[in-house]
């Protein structure tokens, strides 16, 4: 885990994940049998087919505010009308609301939320696929799917040891080679790559080798060539055109998995919506939400060819940042087109502008004026248009980033003001948000429900207001999987 400022945003505990990987799972499943069995019987009575091609898309940190912001933004770029441009997945025929609290808090992390989605059980923050006593391991939907003969694919744009992908693969080394494809876009763990190679995975990490993968490639571990913060794929706003996108990985996953007559289960995580929201970087979050929608569009295209056997479920694991549309300073107005002026994420600004400046400039010589043109270029934020209070806040944050003493001590307020990020950068994004009319309450997750969308066979199961553990049960039911008894 990186210790650098602003990067300490991991949603799960790496140690717990590695521990789970190395333990022999007990394959114990707790809960859900009765309801799932009842749903199975009901569907069989109707003569409906089982879901054979099953997608679970998880937007990390994506609840209604993130979806709405992307929809307002998409329309605001081309029109002053008070209207939205819906995302592809927000037009799915069925939607529901999903509670996300875990066994120990109303505010879940990605490990306990992922465990709920993957295994149907609530647990504590930081725990991956184990119960609250950390002694019983849960059996996951990926394992059940594999047992029925389905291929399993895992795609994420954050690194292998992050919680959301981990909950779907965490037991794989001890369970044998049950993934036909583990499309994993980045990994800072060379030993994981070595383990995968030892288990017969084909390992690729160049766009050329990736594009050359063909149906019948067998087990594949694909790692993205370009890695940004904490060994994750770059934010979509920073992605170069010759780098692969989350949609590219999803499409290739479909190509490699769909040659199996028994079907497949594929989990795709949009992991960096969460990271952007931790930093309150609205433009980066919006662009990653749109990239996530693009990845889902690949599944929708596949579903068009197999409409009676494909199920696509899209959900979030929790909300991040307490994002909302509306800010005290802009009252009833919004200016989302301003977010379109931003050209890079907070991370890219730290790496390409602020860090070099800090390195080259003695702190007593540093002046905010030196960076004003770069701030305008990167964020579209015009210093001259800021209010006196905003200018003072920016100057204050600049001095903090340079490590200079300021008149009043902010040591205790540092987290509240900047959330552990570079003070200057997070202040710029805060001013950007304020100008656009976007509000935030936190640098962590929040406890509001997320939205779940469904399209395809047995989509109707996902209507209503239910818990995140129910998503596992509903998906198992749609796949006609008989869950193990407690
Ligand atoms: Zn998070």
Image (cartoon, grey):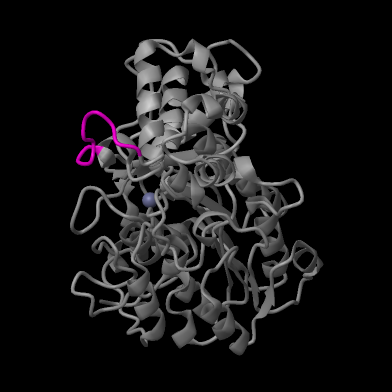
At a point 53% along the width and 22% down the height, the residue shown is: 381
Q: Is residue 291 left or right of residue 461?
A: right
265 vs 221, nearest the viewer: 221
Magenta highlight range: 404-413
Task: Determine the image quadrant of residue 337.
Answer: top right
Viewed as shown, does residue 293 lie left or right of 426?
A: right
Q: Residue at x 41, y 21 (%)?
A: 434
Res 460 seen here: no
Location of residue 7 with respect to 327 vertically, above or below = below
Percent of width and height locating residue 16: 33, 73
**Quadrant assignment for the N terminus:** bottom left
Q: Main secondary structure of the magenta part?
A: loop
Is residue 14 part of the magenta span, yes or no?
no
Residue 122, given in percent of the width and then of the height, sits at 26, 62
Pick whichever, 373 or 304, lies toward us: 373
Residue at image position (41%, 67%) is: 167
Residue 213 vertical placement versus 309 (above, below): below
Nearer the observer, 182 or 231: 231
């Amino acid at each position: 885990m990186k210790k650098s400022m602003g990067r300490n945003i991991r949603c799960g505990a790496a140690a717990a994940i590695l521990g789970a990987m190395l333990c022999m799972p007990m394959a114990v499943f707790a809960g859900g049998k009765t309801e799932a069995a009842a749903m199975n019987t009901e569907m069989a009575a109707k003569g409906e087919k089982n879901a054979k091609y099953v997608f679970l898309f998880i937007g990390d940190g994506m609840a209604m505010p993130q979806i709405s912001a992307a929809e307002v933004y998409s329309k605001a770029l081309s029109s002053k009308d008070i209207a939205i441009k819906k995302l592809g997945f927000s037009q799915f025929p069925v939607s529901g609301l999903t509670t996300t609290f875990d066994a120990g808090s109303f505010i879940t992390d990605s490990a306990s939320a992922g465990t709920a989605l993957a295994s149907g059980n609530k647990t504590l923050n930081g725990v991956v696929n184990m119960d609250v006593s950390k002694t019983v391991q849960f059996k996951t939907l990926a394992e059940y799917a594999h047992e029925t003969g389905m291929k399993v694919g895992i795609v994420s744009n954050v690194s292998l040891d992050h919680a959301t992908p981990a909950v779907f693969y965490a037991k794989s080394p001890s369970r044998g080679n049950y993934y036909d494809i583990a499309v994993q876009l980045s990994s800072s763990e060379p030993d994981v790559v070595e383990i995968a190679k030892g288990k017969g995975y084909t390992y690729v990490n160049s766009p050329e080798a990736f594009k050359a993968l063909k149906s019948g490639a067998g087990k594949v571990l694909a790692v993205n060539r370009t890695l940004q913060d904490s060994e994750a794929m770059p934010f979509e706003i920073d992605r170069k055109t010759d780098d692969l996108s989350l949609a590219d990985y999803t499409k290739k996953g479909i190509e490699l998995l769909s040659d199996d007559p028994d079907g497949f289960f594929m989990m795709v995580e949009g992991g960096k919506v969460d990271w952007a929201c931790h930093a309150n970087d609205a433009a980066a979050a919006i662009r990653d939400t749109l990239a996530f929608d693009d990845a889902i569009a690949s599944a929708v295209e596949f579903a068009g060819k197999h409409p009676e056997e494909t199920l696509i479920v899209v959900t979030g694991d929790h909300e991040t940042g307490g994002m909302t549309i509306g800010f005290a300073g802009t009252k009833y107005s919004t200016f989302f087109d301003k977010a379109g002026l931003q050209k890079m994420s907070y991370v890219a600004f730290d790496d390409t502008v602020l860090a070099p400046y800090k390195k080259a400039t003695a702190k007593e010589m540093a002046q905010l004026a030196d960076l004003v043109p770069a701030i305008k270029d990167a964020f579209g934020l015009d210093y001259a248009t800021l209010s006196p209070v905003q200018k003072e806040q920016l100057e204050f944050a600049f001095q903090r980033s340079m490590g200079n003493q300021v008149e009043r001590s902010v040591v205790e307020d540092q987290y509240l003001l900047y959330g552990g990020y570079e003070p200057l950068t997070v202040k710029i994004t805060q001013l950007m948000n304020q100008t656009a009319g976007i509000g935030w309450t936190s640098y962590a997750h929040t406890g509001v429900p997320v939205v779940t969308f469904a399209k395809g066979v047995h989509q109707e199961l996902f209507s209503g207001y239910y818990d995140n553990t129910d998503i596992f049960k509903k998906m198992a039911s749609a796949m006609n999987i008989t869950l193990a008894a407690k």
